[in-house]
Image: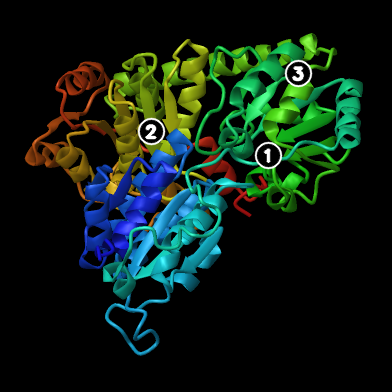
Amino acid sequence: MNAVAKIRGGALLARAFKEKGVDHVFTLAGGFCNPALEGFMECQMPVINCPHEQVSGHLADGHARITRKPAVCLVGPEGFANAVPAMLEAWGERSPVIFVTGSSTLKRQGAGGFKEIDDVAIAAPLCKYSAQIVDGTRISEFVDRAWTAATTGYPGPVHLALPVDIMFSSFEEDAGRAERPFDRSDRPLPRAWPDPSRLAEVLDLVKASERPVMIGGHGVWWSGSEAKLGVAGTRLKMPVFNVPYHTKMLGEDCDAYMGLADFHQYHPSRPAIHEADLVLMVGCRLDNQMNFGNPPFIPPETKLICVNGSHEELEYNIGADIQLLSDPGAFLEALAGVSETWTDWLELQRRRRSDWVSEWSDHIAAETAEDTAQGRQMHPLQLALDVQAGMTDGDWLVFDGGNTHFWNEIATNIAAARGRTLGGILHPGNYSLLGVGVPFALAAKNTHPDKTVVLVTGDGAFLSGGLSIETCFQENIPIVVVVDNNGGLDCISQQQERLFKNQQHFATDFRDIPFHSMFEGLGGYGELVERREQFGPALQRAIASGKTACVNVKCRGVISPIVAATSDKRDKASIE
């Protein structure tokens, strides 16, 4: 009698992910995970080892945001605690990362096992699905369940715990495959089609409006419907705005695209939304950034319609005047068939945008002239603009930090209006979690190896996650890091100076850190820039080096419009 071939539980896990089509795993290799790592090696699946579990989680998150398919973050039990911040960031942006914990032994659960932690309970509030696999024959089933939860409806991160005794135990190769579904490869996603009568009601309201605006959010991106958003806006001459999340869905080639729906980072969005008689939010949440749909963001007399692809999303939007359950793509196709157009209304927004670009361009030119005359350090907005001026169309831009993030948001809209067409943009999401910059830039370069990827990071943000730069060297995935170095947590300092009675800041300063020397010591390229005229050539040398490079730029701290607003008691802001 022939012996039945058996493999470890970790190998079953690896094969299940391979069958789903996972193409990357991110980890910090640990003993609890070794059987899974052996399985991934046998499946010839790329595994990137990271210096910290939080880094591996951010890398998986960045990869998932770009590819719009799940990536795996594999950690040990104590490493799970390190990965929780990455889980939070993925949750905020609904990124379908599958977090897997090689957890403490099932046999002695509750008895103080080695590295025992209740990872399932900890992950539950930050995931769509969190479960422990208690039977090795069900590994493939649980991977299928987790995958389905991560990708269907409103996507998001999920978590699986595989106890170490099951990870190391042996099972038949086809364990658990005698039951449906027999085919556990990735399947087309189910999508919600709109109720015809409810759709007709929404379209009639759109047709009757005089000044409609459309705001696109997460749901548009994760359903792959951004091209349809652009088509609908362009055909109808309807202004389209983007929620200030992790990606810009439309480029400057879309005539209807106006910029962020953010009154502080893109000022022209305020009159557009305040004057609109209908606000059509597609794939959005009425969260803090939208002021929960309330005044002063959206006036009470404005008709507010929310279109979302799942019941879970609609639960966020109970404040809407009308809700429509529909796949964003299906709705946008129907919307594009409306015969009405709003040419004059769109042209008004385009003029406002042009005026805004001119005002900021004049302002920063005057600031830079004064910087040069007085020998001051560079303005952070000027740095952000100079970065994009030194890039090539199709390159990827990542930014990370407090004020650094906000100034780069403004610069991105200005540079785009001047003709710069980037391949993609990544930055922290709804939770403003610092330290994601290097992992996100690495993910962009890993998925687009023929493009230059530039990260603009504050010094505080780099200190939060900069150790992950070692992965760039280890994996030979070169990125260019531009450090907006103002010597401290400037965003917080400025808030303190406006809040504290003595108008001073406290516990926010750093010493003079030679970030460029750090890169040189690791085997990369580094330069220090102290004057604006030095920056352009330094950036080009960094790009041409072909190495992971750092341009360490001494900038002055300048309060950004959004920080000024959130620290000004006279201006109600979303931070409240």
Name the mark on residue 6.
Answer: none
Between the residue at mark 3 and the residue at mark 1, the CA separation in whole angstroms equals: 19 Å
User: Are the two marked residues, 3 and 1, in contact with CB atoms closer than 8 angstroms?
Assistant: no
Question: Sequence-wise, which precedes: disc 3 or disc 2?
Answer: 3
Identify residue for label 1: 191
Kind of residue at badge 2: Val
Q: Nearer the viewer, mark 1 or mark 2?
A: 1
Does label 1 or label 2 sit earlier along the sequence?
A: 1
In the image, taking residue 287 as reference, residue 177 lies left or right, namely left
Residue 516 visible: yes
- Viewer-closest of 87 and 172: 172
Helix or strand or loop: what does disc 1 sit on? Answer: loop
Q: Which residue is mark 2?
A: 398
Residue at image location 37% in from the left, 38% down from the top: 557
Q: Nearer the viewer, residue 64 or 180?
A: 180
- Residue 237 lies left or right of residue 27; in this view the side is right
Q: Is residue 508 above or below residue 512?
A: below
Left or right: 421 as drawn, with respect to 226: left
Residue shown at 50%/65% (left/top)? 130
